[in-house]
Image (cartoon, rainbow, N blue to C red):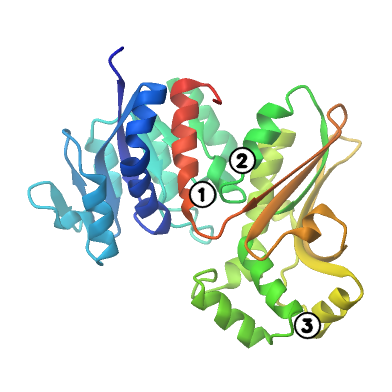
Amino acid sequence: MSTPNTVRLLLVGLGNLGRRFCDLLVQKGPEVEARYGLRLVLVGAADSRGWAYDPAGLDPARVAALKEAGGSVADIPGVGRPARPAAELIAQAEADLLCEASPVNLRQGAEPGLTHIRMALDRGMHVATPNKGPLVLAYRELHDRAARRGVQLRFDGTVAGGLPALYIGQRDLRGATVHRIEAVPNLCTGYVLELLAEGLSWEEAQARARAEGVLEADPSFDLDGWDAAAKLVILVNGVMGYPARLEEVERTGITGLGGAEVVAARQEGRVYKLLATADRLPDEAVSMRVAPVPLPGDHFLARLGRKQMGVIYHTDIYGTIMAAIDEPTPLPSAATMLRDILDIYTNAHV
Protein backbone atom coordinates (compact mmCIF):
# COMPACT_ATOMS: atom_id res chain seq x y z
CA MET A 1 0.00 0.00 0.00
CA SER A 2 1.33 3.46 -0.88
CA THR A 3 2.26 5.92 1.86
CA PRO A 4 -0.64 8.28 2.61
CA ASN A 5 -0.32 11.95 1.77
CA THR A 6 -0.35 13.97 4.99
CA VAL A 7 -2.45 17.14 4.90
CA ARG A 8 -1.75 19.56 7.76
CA LEU A 9 -4.91 21.46 8.69
CA LEU A 10 -5.61 24.68 10.53
CA LEU A 11 -9.15 25.15 11.84
CA VAL A 12 -10.33 28.64 12.75
CA GLY A 13 -13.72 28.78 14.43
CA LEU A 14 -14.90 26.16 16.89
CA GLY A 15 -18.62 26.85 17.06
CA ASN A 16 -21.27 24.43 15.84
CA LEU A 17 -19.50 23.72 12.55
CA GLY A 18 -15.93 23.66 13.86
CA ARG A 19 -16.73 21.26 16.71
CA ARG A 20 -18.55 18.90 14.39
CA PHE A 21 -15.69 19.05 11.92
CA CYS A 22 -13.39 17.84 14.69
CA ASP A 23 -15.80 14.97 15.32
CA LEU A 24 -15.69 14.16 11.60
CA LEU A 25 -11.88 14.02 11.64
CA VAL A 26 -12.15 11.36 14.34
CA GLN A 27 -15.05 9.49 12.76
CA LYS A 28 -14.03 9.62 9.10
CA GLY A 29 -10.24 9.94 9.34
CA PRO A 30 -9.46 6.20 8.95
CA GLU A 31 -11.86 5.88 6.01
CA VAL A 32 -10.41 8.96 4.28
CA GLU A 33 -6.91 7.54 4.68
CA ALA A 34 -7.89 4.10 3.39
CA ARG A 35 -10.08 5.29 0.54
CA TYR A 36 -8.31 8.43 -0.64
CA GLY A 37 -4.77 8.05 0.66
CA LEU A 38 -5.00 11.22 2.72
CA ARG A 39 -3.99 11.52 6.36
CA LEU A 40 -5.70 14.60 7.75
CA VAL A 41 -3.75 16.05 10.68
CA LEU A 42 -5.13 18.96 12.70
CA VAL A 43 -1.99 20.92 13.60
CA GLY A 44 -3.65 24.14 14.73
CA ALA A 45 -7.01 25.40 15.96
CA ALA A 46 -8.32 28.76 17.10
CA ASP A 47 -11.41 30.07 18.85
CA SER A 48 -12.40 33.47 20.20
CA ARG A 49 -10.18 33.04 23.29
CA GLY A 50 -6.93 32.00 21.67
CA TRP A 51 -5.29 29.20 19.74
CA ALA A 52 -3.26 26.02 19.98
CA TYR A 53 -0.58 24.72 17.63
CA ASP A 54 1.32 21.44 17.60
CA PRO A 55 3.22 20.39 14.46
CA ALA A 56 2.82 16.75 15.57
CA GLY A 57 -0.94 17.15 15.57
CA LEU A 58 -3.68 18.09 18.02
CA ASP A 59 -6.21 15.48 19.11
CA PRO A 60 -9.49 16.58 17.42
CA ALA A 61 -11.51 14.57 19.95
CA ARG A 62 -9.88 16.51 22.76
CA VAL A 63 -10.51 19.82 20.99
CA ALA A 64 -14.20 18.99 20.51
CA ALA A 65 -14.57 17.84 24.14
CA LEU A 66 -12.91 21.01 25.41
CA LYS A 67 -15.30 23.19 23.45
CA GLU A 68 -18.33 21.10 24.44
CA ALA A 69 -17.36 21.68 28.09
CA GLY A 70 -17.14 25.45 27.54
CA GLY A 71 -13.36 25.64 27.41
CA SER A 72 -10.90 26.95 24.84
CA VAL A 73 -8.16 25.34 22.77
CA ALA A 74 -5.90 27.92 24.36
CA ASP A 75 -6.27 25.90 27.58
CA ILE A 76 -4.33 22.91 26.16
CA PRO A 77 -1.12 22.68 28.21
CA GLY A 78 2.12 23.40 26.41
CA VAL A 79 0.62 24.27 23.03
CA GLY A 80 -2.20 26.68 23.93
CA ARG A 81 -1.83 30.44 23.55
CA PRO A 82 -4.55 32.35 25.42
CA ALA A 83 -5.83 35.75 24.27
CA ARG A 84 -3.99 35.58 20.94
CA PRO A 85 -5.76 36.22 17.60
CA ALA A 86 -6.27 33.50 15.01
CA ALA A 87 -4.44 35.65 12.45
CA GLU A 88 -1.26 35.11 14.47
CA LEU A 89 -1.68 31.34 14.18
CA ILE A 90 -2.22 31.57 10.41
CA ALA A 91 0.85 33.77 10.04
CA GLN A 92 3.14 31.42 11.98
CA ALA A 93 1.90 27.86 11.51
CA GLU A 94 3.29 25.40 8.99
CA ALA A 95 0.16 24.04 7.35
CA ASP A 96 -1.21 23.03 3.98
CA LEU A 97 -4.86 24.09 4.29
CA LEU A 98 -7.03 26.45 6.29
CA CYS A 99 -10.56 25.52 7.29
CA GLU A 100 -12.13 28.92 8.03
CA ALA A 101 -15.32 28.49 10.07
CA SER A 102 -15.48 31.73 12.03
CA PRO A 103 -18.89 33.44 12.40
CA VAL A 104 -20.39 35.20 9.38
CA ASN A 105 -20.01 38.95 9.68
CA LEU A 106 -21.37 40.97 6.79
CA ARG A 107 -21.90 44.07 8.90
CA GLN A 108 -18.19 44.63 9.57
CA GLY A 109 -16.48 43.82 6.31
CA ALA A 110 -16.67 40.03 6.70
CA GLU A 111 -13.98 40.19 9.37
CA PRO A 112 -12.10 38.42 10.76
CA GLY A 113 -12.79 35.68 8.19
CA LEU A 114 -11.75 37.77 5.18
CA THR A 115 -8.36 38.56 6.71
CA HIS A 116 -7.86 34.90 7.66
CA ILE A 117 -8.53 33.71 4.12
CA ARG A 118 -6.35 36.39 2.52
CA MET A 119 -3.46 35.50 4.83
CA ALA A 120 -3.76 31.77 4.20
CA LEU A 121 -3.89 32.18 0.42
CA ASP A 122 -0.95 34.58 0.45
CA ARG A 123 1.06 32.03 2.47
CA GLY A 124 0.33 29.35 -0.13
CA MET A 125 -2.36 27.44 1.77
CA HIS A 126 -5.48 26.01 0.22
CA VAL A 127 -8.71 27.19 1.85
CA ALA A 128 -12.00 25.41 2.54
CA THR A 129 -14.69 27.56 4.13
CA PRO A 130 -18.40 27.60 4.88
CA ASN A 131 -18.08 31.30 5.85
CA LYS A 132 -20.12 33.16 3.23
CA GLY A 133 -19.10 36.68 4.27
CA PRO A 134 -15.69 36.81 2.55
CA LEU A 135 -17.09 35.31 -0.67
CA VAL A 136 -19.96 37.81 -0.76
CA LEU A 137 -17.73 40.84 -0.33
CA ALA A 138 -14.56 39.74 -2.16
CA TYR A 139 -15.43 36.87 -4.49
CA ARG A 140 -13.23 37.84 -7.44
CA GLU A 141 -10.37 39.19 -5.33
CA LEU A 142 -10.06 35.94 -3.37
CA HIS A 143 -10.14 33.83 -6.52
CA ASP A 144 -7.44 36.01 -8.07
CA ARG A 145 -5.27 35.64 -4.94
CA ALA A 146 -5.65 31.88 -5.02
CA ALA A 147 -4.74 31.75 -8.71
CA ARG A 148 -1.64 33.90 -8.19
CA ARG A 149 -0.36 31.54 -5.51
CA GLY A 150 -1.38 28.36 -7.32
CA VAL A 151 -3.67 27.23 -4.50
CA GLN A 152 -7.36 26.42 -4.36
CA LEU A 153 -10.31 28.09 -2.68
CA ARG A 154 -13.36 25.93 -1.95
CA PHE A 155 -16.59 27.20 -0.40
CA ASP A 156 -19.36 24.72 -1.14
CA GLY A 157 -20.73 25.08 2.39
CA THR A 158 -21.56 28.76 1.93
CA VAL A 159 -24.85 27.99 0.17
CA ALA A 160 -27.72 25.85 1.52
CA GLY A 161 -25.76 23.97 4.15
CA GLY A 162 -24.66 20.51 3.08
CA LEU A 163 -26.47 20.63 -0.26
CA PRO A 164 -23.83 20.60 -3.04
CA ALA A 165 -25.63 23.44 -4.79
CA LEU A 166 -22.44 25.07 -6.05
CA TYR A 167 -20.87 21.78 -7.16
CA ILE A 168 -23.99 20.94 -9.14
CA GLY A 169 -24.12 24.35 -10.77
CA GLN A 170 -20.41 24.73 -11.51
CA ARG A 171 -19.49 21.18 -12.49
CA ASP A 172 -22.47 19.05 -13.35
CA LEU A 173 -23.92 21.79 -15.55
CA ARG A 174 -20.68 22.46 -17.45
CA GLY A 175 -21.36 23.54 -21.01
CA ALA A 176 -24.80 24.88 -20.18
CA THR A 177 -26.14 28.39 -19.82
CA VAL A 178 -28.07 28.71 -16.57
CA HIS A 179 -30.71 31.30 -17.33
CA ARG A 180 -32.67 31.11 -14.07
CA ILE A 181 -31.98 30.06 -10.48
CA GLU A 182 -34.66 29.51 -7.86
CA ALA A 183 -33.59 28.64 -4.34
CA VAL A 184 -34.73 28.33 -0.77
CA PRO A 185 -31.25 28.49 0.76
CA ASN A 186 -32.13 29.58 4.32
CA LEU A 187 -33.30 26.97 6.81
CA CYS A 188 -34.37 29.39 9.56
CA THR A 189 -37.04 31.20 7.55
CA GLY A 190 -38.46 27.92 6.26
CA TYR A 191 -38.79 26.68 9.82
CA VAL A 192 -40.52 29.86 11.05
CA LEU A 193 -42.88 29.98 8.05
CA GLU A 194 -43.91 26.35 8.63
CA LEU A 195 -44.78 27.14 12.25
CA LEU A 196 -46.75 30.23 11.19
CA ALA A 197 -48.67 28.09 8.69
CA GLU A 198 -49.62 25.77 11.56
CA GLY A 199 -51.23 28.71 13.34
CA LEU A 200 -48.51 29.72 15.81
CA SER A 201 -48.04 33.41 16.48
CA TRP A 202 -44.83 35.21 15.46
CA GLU A 203 -43.68 35.20 19.08
CA GLU A 204 -44.41 31.48 19.48
CA ALA A 205 -42.75 30.58 16.19
CA GLN A 206 -39.58 32.49 17.03
CA ALA A 207 -39.44 31.03 20.54
CA ARG A 208 -39.78 27.49 19.15
CA ALA A 209 -37.13 28.14 16.52
CA ARG A 210 -34.75 29.46 19.18
CA ALA A 211 -35.39 26.48 21.44
CA GLU A 212 -34.56 24.19 18.51
CA GLY A 213 -31.29 26.03 17.90
CA VAL A 214 -32.50 27.16 14.48
CA LEU A 215 -32.67 30.88 15.21
CA GLU A 216 -29.90 33.08 16.60
CA ALA A 217 -30.38 35.50 19.49
CA ASP A 218 -30.39 38.27 16.84
CA PRO A 219 -32.63 36.79 14.13
CA SER A 220 -32.52 39.77 11.76
CA PHE A 221 -29.79 38.35 9.50
CA ASP A 222 -32.08 35.44 8.61
CA LEU A 223 -35.56 36.90 8.94
CA ASP A 224 -34.75 40.11 7.04
CA GLY A 225 -33.44 38.11 4.09
CA TRP A 226 -29.75 39.00 4.36
CA ASP A 227 -28.59 35.39 4.61
CA ALA A 228 -30.61 34.31 1.55
CA ALA A 229 -29.39 37.36 -0.40
CA ALA A 230 -25.76 36.61 0.47
CA LYS A 231 -26.13 33.01 -0.69
CA LEU A 232 -27.77 34.16 -3.91
CA VAL A 233 -24.82 36.47 -4.61
CA ILE A 234 -22.42 33.52 -4.26
CA LEU A 235 -24.59 31.31 -6.50
CA VAL A 236 -24.77 33.96 -9.21
CA ASN A 237 -21.02 34.57 -9.10
CA GLY A 238 -20.16 30.89 -9.06
CA VAL A 239 -22.74 29.44 -11.44
CA MET A 240 -23.81 32.27 -13.73
CA GLY A 241 -20.40 33.92 -13.90
CA TYR A 242 -21.87 37.35 -13.23
CA PRO A 243 -19.99 39.60 -10.72
CA ALA A 244 -22.99 40.02 -8.44
CA ARG A 245 -22.91 42.32 -5.41
CA LEU A 246 -25.11 42.23 -2.34
CA GLU A 247 -26.48 45.72 -2.97
CA GLU A 248 -27.87 44.54 -6.33
CA VAL A 249 -30.27 42.10 -4.67
CA GLU A 250 -33.84 43.35 -4.30
CA ARG A 251 -34.46 42.12 -0.76
CA THR A 252 -37.61 41.69 1.33
CA GLY A 253 -37.58 39.56 4.47
CA ILE A 254 -40.44 37.68 6.10
CA THR A 255 -40.97 39.95 9.11
CA GLY A 256 -43.59 42.00 7.28
CA LEU A 257 -45.64 38.90 6.60
CA GLY A 258 -48.65 38.34 8.85
CA GLY A 259 -49.32 34.91 10.30
CA ALA A 260 -52.87 35.09 8.98
CA GLU A 261 -51.55 35.54 5.43
CA VAL A 262 -49.40 32.42 5.76
CA VAL A 263 -52.31 30.38 7.14
CA ALA A 264 -54.70 31.64 4.44
CA ALA A 265 -52.22 30.75 1.69
CA ARG A 266 -51.88 27.22 3.08
CA GLN A 267 -55.65 26.81 3.13
CA GLU A 268 -55.69 27.80 -0.56
CA GLY A 269 -53.02 25.20 -1.39
CA ARG A 270 -50.11 27.63 -1.55
CA VAL A 271 -46.96 27.61 0.59
CA TYR A 272 -44.97 30.67 1.57
CA LYS A 273 -41.20 30.37 1.14
CA LEU A 274 -38.46 32.98 1.27
CA LEU A 275 -37.53 32.57 -2.38
CA ALA A 276 -34.22 33.67 -3.88
CA THR A 277 -34.29 34.08 -7.66
CA ALA A 278 -31.81 35.13 -10.31
CA ASP A 279 -32.72 35.71 -13.96
CA ARG A 280 -30.24 36.25 -16.77
CA LEU A 281 -31.19 39.34 -18.78
CA PRO A 282 -30.69 39.87 -22.55
CA ASP A 283 -27.68 42.13 -21.91
CA GLU A 284 -26.01 39.35 -19.84
CA ALA A 285 -26.69 41.16 -16.58
CA VAL A 286 -28.61 39.28 -13.88
CA SER A 287 -31.69 40.38 -11.97
CA MET A 288 -31.71 39.13 -8.35
CA ARG A 289 -34.52 39.08 -5.82
CA VAL A 290 -35.21 37.68 -2.35
CA ALA A 291 -38.80 37.84 -1.11
CA PRO A 292 -41.50 35.72 0.54
CA VAL A 293 -43.58 34.12 -2.21
CA PRO A 294 -46.73 31.97 -1.95
CA LEU A 295 -45.70 29.07 -4.18
CA PRO A 296 -48.21 26.63 -5.68
CA GLY A 297 -48.37 23.49 -3.57
CA ASP A 298 -46.97 21.32 -6.36
CA HIS A 299 -43.85 23.48 -6.83
CA PHE A 300 -40.67 21.57 -5.96
CA LEU A 301 -39.56 24.17 -3.42
CA ALA A 302 -43.03 24.38 -1.86
CA ARG A 303 -42.70 20.73 -0.83
CA LEU A 304 -39.62 21.37 1.29
CA GLY A 305 -40.04 20.54 4.98
CA ARG A 306 -39.18 22.82 7.88
CA LYS A 307 -35.51 21.79 8.01
CA GLN A 308 -34.96 21.44 4.30
CA MET A 309 -33.37 23.66 1.65
CA GLY A 310 -33.35 23.41 -2.12
CA VAL A 311 -32.28 24.84 -5.45
CA ILE A 312 -33.57 24.71 -9.04
CA TYR A 313 -31.40 25.42 -12.08
CA HIS A 314 -33.12 26.22 -15.38
CA THR A 315 -30.67 25.54 -18.22
CA ASP A 316 -30.55 25.61 -21.99
CA ILE A 317 -29.28 22.07 -22.62
CA TYR A 318 -29.73 20.03 -19.43
CA GLY A 319 -33.35 20.86 -18.77
CA THR A 320 -34.34 21.80 -15.24
CA ILE A 321 -32.26 20.40 -12.38
CA MET A 322 -33.75 20.26 -8.88
CA ALA A 323 -31.98 19.29 -5.66
CA ALA A 324 -32.84 19.46 -1.97
CA ILE A 325 -31.38 18.54 1.40
CA ASP A 326 -32.90 17.58 4.73
CA GLU A 327 -30.57 19.00 7.40
CA PRO A 328 -31.88 18.31 10.91
CA THR A 329 -28.47 19.15 12.48
CA PRO A 330 -25.46 21.27 11.42
CA LEU A 331 -23.44 18.10 10.64
CA PRO A 332 -23.94 18.29 6.84
CA SER A 333 -22.78 21.91 6.85
CA ALA A 334 -19.64 20.95 8.79
CA ALA A 335 -19.07 18.03 6.42
CA THR A 336 -18.77 20.42 3.47
CA MET A 337 -15.25 21.23 4.66
CA LEU A 338 -14.34 17.56 4.36
CA ARG A 339 -15.91 17.45 0.91
CA ASP A 340 -13.94 20.51 -0.14
CA ILE A 341 -10.67 19.04 1.17
CA LEU A 342 -11.25 15.83 -0.78
CA ASP A 343 -12.06 17.85 -3.88
CA ILE A 344 -8.81 19.80 -3.56
CA TYR A 345 -6.59 16.78 -3.01
CA THR A 346 -8.26 14.09 -5.10
CA ASN A 347 -10.08 16.11 -7.79
CA ALA A 348 -12.52 13.24 -7.92
CA HIS A 349 -16.09 12.60 -6.90
CA VAL A 350 -16.21 8.94 -5.86
Q: Residue at x 50, y 59 (%)?
A: 329
Q: State the residue position of label 2.
A: 164
Q: Position of residue 39 (x, y in %)?
A: 30, 28
Mark 3 belongs to which amino acid? Gly
Name the disc covering residue 258, or none: 3
Q: Earlier in the sequence, mark 1 or mark 3?
A: 3
Quarter that holds the N terminus: top left
Name the mark nearer the viewer: 3 or 2: 2
Of residue 140 and residue 58, the one placed in the foreground of this image is 58
Residue 332: give its label: 1
Picture residue at 71% right of the left edge, 73% below the top:
193
> Where is residue 116 drawn, in percent x and y?
38, 43
Q: CA distance from mark 1 to mark 2?
A: 10 Å
- Give above or below for 63 relative to 203: above
Residue 49 visible to an observer of this rendering: no
The amino acid pointed to by label 2 is Pro
Say if 23 sits above or below 176 in the image.
below
